[in-house]
Image: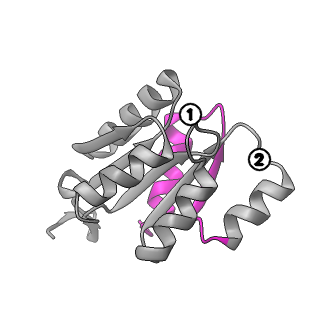
Amino acid sequence: MSFMTDNNSIRPNFAEYQVIIAEDEPMATKLAQGALKLMGFRRIFHAPDGLKALKLLKELDGDVQLIVSDWNMPEINGLEFLKAVRKTFPNMRFVMLTGNANKDFVIAARKYGVDAYIAKPFTPDQLKQKIEAIFRL
């Protein structure tokens, strides 16, 4: 994995990272893809539900550095997807998107090791800030 230097700091080269976006809403998917592209991510994969996202993760042999997932999706929801990911990839960086960021959601997401969560609707800058925080940039 190579790193780019920027203002004397070492930052990961996001162009080499693989990202899965698990999201069933087309507009939220486009917004997340756009924000990731602006950050330098180039290898962005999309799945419309958690089940397809798990299949995609297997097809990529777990070589994924970031997952951005919706909470409410068909097949299996974001929390079930997060639980499944954590069983095999306990350190996978995982950002949860939700239209319902209530206390119970936050408690459940934290219990299963979500790295960050963002309430919908979100801005590209909010997603960028969360991702930079979990990569500690």
Q: Element under label 2?
A: loop
Q: Which of marks 1 and 2 is nearer the N terminus?
A: 2
Residue 110 is labelled as: none
Single out the mark in the foreground, 1 or 2: 2
The percent coordinates of residue 134 (x first, y second) are 48, 65
Range of the magenta residues? 112-137
Q: Which residue lies furthest to the right in this view?
A: 103
- For residue 101, the mark is 2
Give the colour scheme shown.
one colour
Image spot of residue 60 (x, y percent): 23, 57
Name which residue lies at 70% across and 72% down: 111
- Alpha carbon distance from label 1 to label 2: 16 Å
- Residue under circle 1? 123
Q: Residues within 10 Å of mark 2 (few under 14, many from 20)?
A: some
The quadrant of the rendering that contains the C terminus is bottom left
Q: Give the residue type that dot 1 points to.
A: Thr
Residue 115 can be seen in this image: no
Residue that appears at 47% across and 66% down: 85
Specify whether 41 is left or right of 99: left
60 is higher (above) or lower (below) than 41: below
- In this view, the residue in front, 125 or 56, is 56
Let me know if residue 136 is in the magenta part.
yes
- Taking 74 as reference, is 91 left or right? left
Disc 1 on helix, strand or loop? loop
Residue 67: name its quadrant. bottom left
Looking at the rendered structure, the kind of residue marked 2 is Ala
Within the magenta stretch, is there residue 35? no
Residue 81 against residue 87 in the figure, above or below: above
The answer to whether residue 81 shows anywhere in this view is yes
Residue placed at 47% from the left, 23% from the top? 26
Q: Quadrant of the N terminus?
A: bottom left
Q: State the image coordinates of residue 40 (x, y, percent, origin top left).
A: 26, 45
